[in-house]
Amino acid sequence: MGDAGLLNLLLYLPVIGAAILAFVPARDDARIRWISLVVMILQLVIAAYLYERFDASDPGLQFATRIPWIADWGVYYHIGLDGMNLLLVLLTAFLGPLVVAGAFSAITKDVKLFYAMVFLIQFTMLGTFLAQDLFLFYLFWEAMMIPMFLIIGIWGGERRIYATLKFVLYTAFGSILMLAAVIYLVMSLQDTTGVTSFAFEDLYRSQLPLATQQILLCAFALSFAIKVPVVPLHTWLPDAHVEAPTAGSVILAGVLLKMGTYGFMKLGFPLFPDATRLATPIIMALAVVSIVYGACLALVQKDIKKIIAYSSISHLGYVMLGLASLDLIGIQGAVVQMVSHGLTAAGLFLMVGMIYERCHSRELAAYGGLAKVLPLYSVFFMILTLASIGLPTTSGFTGEFLVLLGAFGASWQSYLHGSATMLVLAVSAVLGVVLGALYMLYFAQRFLFGAVKAPHGVPGDLGFRESAILALIVAAVFWLGLFPAEPMSKTELASKRYQTLVMTARLPAETRTAQTGATP
Amino acid sequence: MNAHEVLVGMLPEHFLLAGIVLLIVQDIAASRARDGFGIALAAVFAAAAAALLLGTGGAASAPFPGQFSVTPSDFLAKAVVLALAVPVLLLSREDFAEARFHVLVLSSLYGACLMLSSDTFLTLFIGLELMSLPVYVLVVLAYRDTRNAEAALKYLVLGGTASASLLMGASLMYGGSGSLSLATFAEALSLPDPMATAGAMLVITSFFLKAAIVPFHAWAPDAYEGASVPVTAYMATIVKAAVLLAAVRLFAMAPVDGGVADVIALLPLVSIVWGNLAAMRQKSFRRMIAYSSIAHAGYLFYALLGDAPSRFQAVLFYVLAYGLMNLLAFCALPRGEDADRLESFKGLFARAPYASLMIAVAMLSLAGIPPLPGFVAKFLVFRNVMAAGYTTYAVLGLVGSYLGIYFYLRVIQLMFMTADAPARGAAAPRRLMLSSTLLCLVPAVAIGVFPGWVMGYF
């Protein structure tokens, strides 16, 4: 099998896994768990192999498959790896076995259905990242909602139905407007160039008038911004996170939220570059608001899961800031930040799940001094906390530092051209770093230090399975913090491509001259 | 008219007729009441297979020129309608064993086929009546309480109104043009003559009535709730499919623009929104499906906004996907006294996991969530509407379809997420249910995964 075949195998392995599970008796929980874990590990091995084989000097699509699918509409089954989705695919495959292993003890009801749903969401997430055709992308994008709806709704906490319906109704609203925009975009591509195609590459060449670009950007951006989520569209996230089972939170924070930022990077901004450049200050402002507002809210939460949920909003604000800066360093920082947040948030949610399994409480006030009784747990928790606030040598530092560097680079340029807005925004983003350190350290201090207290007596420390999961995450955090050069070299060309696409004017020729004529 | 054309061009109809005759003969000849299921199934299957083979083989003929003609796409439309009847027959196995049920179903299907080949308003009217009259009887056939009778009466009265409206419209157009040909409809749409316009509008109204478009929809929830499950399934899928495909035939090459487009778009838009909103507060599953079908009728009429060649493809694909998925839900539906109440869906997954999964798939598809075929169907319709330049209507329709997601998901929520009395004795699916659901699911998955392949034939 060639490498393209391997990429397809990577994508369909979860479906195969779910199909295997269908034939395992529903009561044989242990076998279901181990089969799921083996399939997920196999997937990680394939992803790691493809990552190694990925050629950093090739700017195009690698290991691609392109087969006509709905010929009449110009829809192709087109998947492939490029620098933009490479790390995210690796992240998804990396978190897969951890999610499965992490749920070994937590999920005891309808185990078979649960792992089938985890497989399905893995499949749809990988599909969304790998798709190079807008129709295929939308298919996976929207389908992703179903397994998540069930995961939160079936295995969630007390208010799970409210939370899951809120999640679905939010995301579906964004999607439906995006669908309208997708159809309109393809139709206008057909009208202007005569090409009927959903391929990203063709759509990057569309020439739309500015007003159309702005409307379509709004529709796409709404859908992506709900997923990220960008303040003020974030209110579904805390509910979903709090009610979701640990595995659901890990998938949600680890990968699902990156769909939004990936969507902006792959589609939203490069498809409508002229509208994007005009909107950059607004996007940056929303990003900074997300950073600061998310951090402020995290500071006052009493529920451990909510703290991490709001910190996610704040951290993804950096990604948006990096993408909107249109500075190569900032963009690269955004990519690293996506992966870094995926690792640290996933790790923290897993750790919250572990303590919840022992003590059945998420109230921060119920805990204290865990460092004395749970040394191993506390070490892991501290490392992930420090990574989350961006301590040097961890992945969080690489991401946040580069993003801020990029944002300052870009805003300094605009300052020299006489606009101070961007500079103010960049400075405010730095405030987020301080706030981030504040709420995370405050959280860790109350959680780990002080007088020992825990609901229902002192819990036991981590077992082997739990330590192994966390050790893997911590290793990845340090790998990305200490040796970022290697992964970043693989994403560099894609980031450059994104920058070029957004920086290049793509208005129809006649309107461009009309515009430059109007504003000398 | 020559014998060969009559033989081949009406082959599906002949199979149905043979089935009807055989059933009646058997009923008279046999000393005791005999089961008509086998004959009916064989007749419908043969008719569907004949229509499919003739359609894909590119057969066209005009057995009765000017009255009745078939093109390959007409054969395909008949094949879809007839194929959808197969799960309905399987579904009725437990409720109806007597031959009279099967005679009525076959007659109704005959009417549907006639309607899909009609060239004049006369044939169209005969087909429409032949399709509808048996259904009025079918609704009361499982007479249990007054509700069935009320449902049947409502359906009958409104069906009668539709027929009257169709006849009135046809005669007004006949007065202007001196012809009963369906082509006068397309002309009447573009003529400035008020008489012709009134005639065309009356004809459109009759189709709206039959398809349950707001504000002509009030009969549907009562009829759907009052009838027995197989009959509800028949009305929701086959009657709706036949009416919409006949509407495509009626509009044929007629350009839909200007004021006509607003009529064609506005009421269906209201149907989409109202159907989806009203479905939210239903407590009965079949009433909910009734409102859902009102919304789906809206999407289907939307398809007429597209340019002429694309309408048939969109409508046929839509009724296929919609019909299969509706039937899937009905086939998997648990039976029993209270089975129709949505309350009784609580915790169904623990009791009947297979049935719950099937219903969930059906609901997600009806909600238009990919990768299920309902999504491709919806995409096809809205793509055509937008291609024809009705961007505003398309966006409003999509937002209307968003409103529908909630109540479809509520069914899933009740089945999977709301625990009921701990009844862990998971029942294995009955063999009949297994076969009928697979009969719906497998083709649905096929058209969902390879829509391009199916549409190539349409």
Image (tube, grey):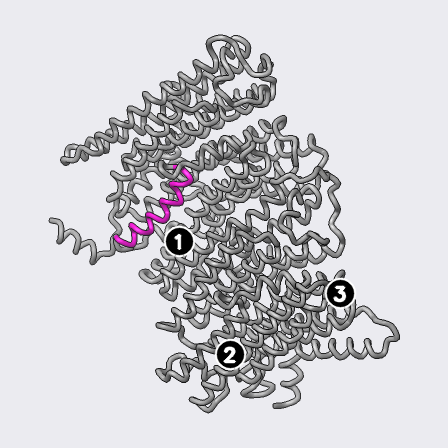
Verify CB contact (< 8 Å) between mark 2 and mark 3.
no
Splitting the image into 4 quarters, where does residue A296 fall?
A: top left
> Which numbered circle lies on residue A472?
none
In which chain is the residue bearing label 3?
A: B
Identify residue type, mark 3.
Answer: Phe
Q: Nearer the viewer, mark 1 or mark 3?
A: 3
Q: Position of residue B407 (x, y in %)?
A: 54, 50
| Amino acid, disc 1 | Val
The residue depicted at 44 percent of the width and 60 percent of the height is B382
Q: Is residue B189 above or below residue A123?
A: below
Q: Are marks 1 and 3 on the same chain?
A: no
Q: Which residue is mark 1?
A: A182
Q: Is residue A447 shown in magenta?
A: no
Q: Is residue A215 magenta?
A: yes
**B231 or B383: nearer the eye?**
B231
Looking at the rendered structure, the kind of residue marked 2 is Ser
How far apart are the two marked residues, 1 and 3, measured between alpha carbons? Answer: 47 Å
In front of the other: A14 or B18: B18
Chain on which label 2 sits:
B
* Magenta-highlighted residues: A211-229
Residue B82 is left or right of residue A302, and the answer is right
